[in-house]
């Protein structure tokens, strides 16, 4: 089934009238959404395997499932990503992990350079996308005991310091060549499965390591550094060295970005509630958008209350230009191309819903003290016809509509993915 362009335009005209009654300009919302980009994570395409072929995942990371057709090399991952981007309306970024170096020679992580990612840069220029970057502090012999930048062994710790510095230099090159700041995120798995006898020493070591990593001042026109906290992980259930409190204090002191991953907090904590507190003291924030199910399980993002609340907070706080929006999940149990598209489109729909909210009316009711009207308007906003506006956005961006894009995925699976052993 296919909805005609005329039907899409007719539905949009009717929806536009309804939104106008609430003081919302649907045309302006579409322009606003077109200016937003999402950083698409390359590691969904191959279950965080990377190109090192170093063995099984570790560091508290697990990709469950064995759906056929995952990318096995650069050419396959590139083809999958390129196809996914055609099914996601708007202009977006791609987020690269250090284990995806593909310069044609075997280079250990402490000596990586931008040349090892030259194919990524060339592809990004061809596709007119920008690149972000992440250090890979897992699935390596020097991280086998669960410590990296907080490692008590000076030799192993120096390896990871050198890796982090190399990542900053690579991100800087991304930013210079692609003419857009590359967001560089640092996350480490360091922690303890059971109750530690000493929490102070590993955090002291981590601070010293980070001081060395960030000693060089880099131009934020090219690279923007972020640090990512976590509550717990597999193998670090009792103690995480890089906790929320640690990184929040460190980011403020060093003028770095803080990264909030939606799965890295207690299940009942709201990341949306944290945004206004952080942006009062920091100029920018990195968001890793995922979906935790009972724990930090990195399920594919869907249009649920959590991601809607996140976007509503950004809209109400006029914070879109201060936040970097990136996806971070990996599901090996379903078509990986579909996982990218579902998560990205769900995030964009949440953004659009927030941009179409009658915020002025809601905030006026709050200012006047009429909290009943505030609640009534919030409820009314939930039934406004955003779907018609979303279809118009897809049409404007020359992207398949919501019910159409999956046909492309199924054909790609039959023609390409099914032929991978």
Image (cartoon, grey):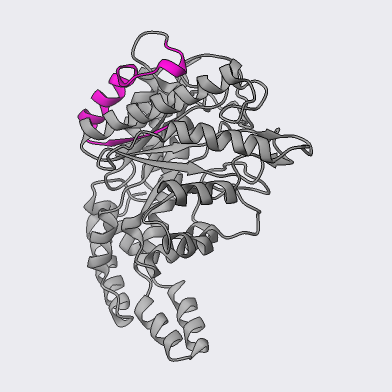
**Image label count:** 0
Please name the residue shown 30% across and 82% down the image: 21
- Front residue of 332/265: it is 265
Is residue 190 left or right of 286 when viewed as pictured?
right
Is residue 276 visible to us here? yes
* Residue 232: percent from left, percent from top: 67, 42
In the rendered image, residue 345, in percent from the top left (x then y), is placed at 40, 49
Please identify the quarter of the rendering in which residue 356 is found: bottom left
Q: Judge by depth and name the residue closer to the eye, 42 or 139.
A: 139
Q: Which residues are magenta?
A: 107-134
Whether residue 117 is situated above or below residue 32 in the rendered picture: above
Name the residue rendered at 24%, 23% in the picture.
Answer: 122
- Horizontal arrangement in the rendering, residue 404 relative to residue 380 (left or right): left
Q: Look at the picture and state if 6 lies above or below 337.
A: below
Could you tell me which residue is drawn at 43 percent across and 46 percent down?
254
* Residue 272 highlighted magenta (yes or no): no
Q: Is residue 11 above or below residue 186?
A: below
Give the quarter of the image for residue 384. bottom left
Most common secondary structure along the magenta stretch: helix
Regarding residue 51, the answer to whether it shows in the image is no
In the image, is residue 129 part of the stretch drawn in magenta? yes
- State the image coordinates of residue 321 (x, y, percent, origin top left): 31, 57
How far from the left and from the top, in percent, is residue 151? 62, 26
Q: Is residue 294 above or below residue 179?
A: below
């Amino acid at each position: 089934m296919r909805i005609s362009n005329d039907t899409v335009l007719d539905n949009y005209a009717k929806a536009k009238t309804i939104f106008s009654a609430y003081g919302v300009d649907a045309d302006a919302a579409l322009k606003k959404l077109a200016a937003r980009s999402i950083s698409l994570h390359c590691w969904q395409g191959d279950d965080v395997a990377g190109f090192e072929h170093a063995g099984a995942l570790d560091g508290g990371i697990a990709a469950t499932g064995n759906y056929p057709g995952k990318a096995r090399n650069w050419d396959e991952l590139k083809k999958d990503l390129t196809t996914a981007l055609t099914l996601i309306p708007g202009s977006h970024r791609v987020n690269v992990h250090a284990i995806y170096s593909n310069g044609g020679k075997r280079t250990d992580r402490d000596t990586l350079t931008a040349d090892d990612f030259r194919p990524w840069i060339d592809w990004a220029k061809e596709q007119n996308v920008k690149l972000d970057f992440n250090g890979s502090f897992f699935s390596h012999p020097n991280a086998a005991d669960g410590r990296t930048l907080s490692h008590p062994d000076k030799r192993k710790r120096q390896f990871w310091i050198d890796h982090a510095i190399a990542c900053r230099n690579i991100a800087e090159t991304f930013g210079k060549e692609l003419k857009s700041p590359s967001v560089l995120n640092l996350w480490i798995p360091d922690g303890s499965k059971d109750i530690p006898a000493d929490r102070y020493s590993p955090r002291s070591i981590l601070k010293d390591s980070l001081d060395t990593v960030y000693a060089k001042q880099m131009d934020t026109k090219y690279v923007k550094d972020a640090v990512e906290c976590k509550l717990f992980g597999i193998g670090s259930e009792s103690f995480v060295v890089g906790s929320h409190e640690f990184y929040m204090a460190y980011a403020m002191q060093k003028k770095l970005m803080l990264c909030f991953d939606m799965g890295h907090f207690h299940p009942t904590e709201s990341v949306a509630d944290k945004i206004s507190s952080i942006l009062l003291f920091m100029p920018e924030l990195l968001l890793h958008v995922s979906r935790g199910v009972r724990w930090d399980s990195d399920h594919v993002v869907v249009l649920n209350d959590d991601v809607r609340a996140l976007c509503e907070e950004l809209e109400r706080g006029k914070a879109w230009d201060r936040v970097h929006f990136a996806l971070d999940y990996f599901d090996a149990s379903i078509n990986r191309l579909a996982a990218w598209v579902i998560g990205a489109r769900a995030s964009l729909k949440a953004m659009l819903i927030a941009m179409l909210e009658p915020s002025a009316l809601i905030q006026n009711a709050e200012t006047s003290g009429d909290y009943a009207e505030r609640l009534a308007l919030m409820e009314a906003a939930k039934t406004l016809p955003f779907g018609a506006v979303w279809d118009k956005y897809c049409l404007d961006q020359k992207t398949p509509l919501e019910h159409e894009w999956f046909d492309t995925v199924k054909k790609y699976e039959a023609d390409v993915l099914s032929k991978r052993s």
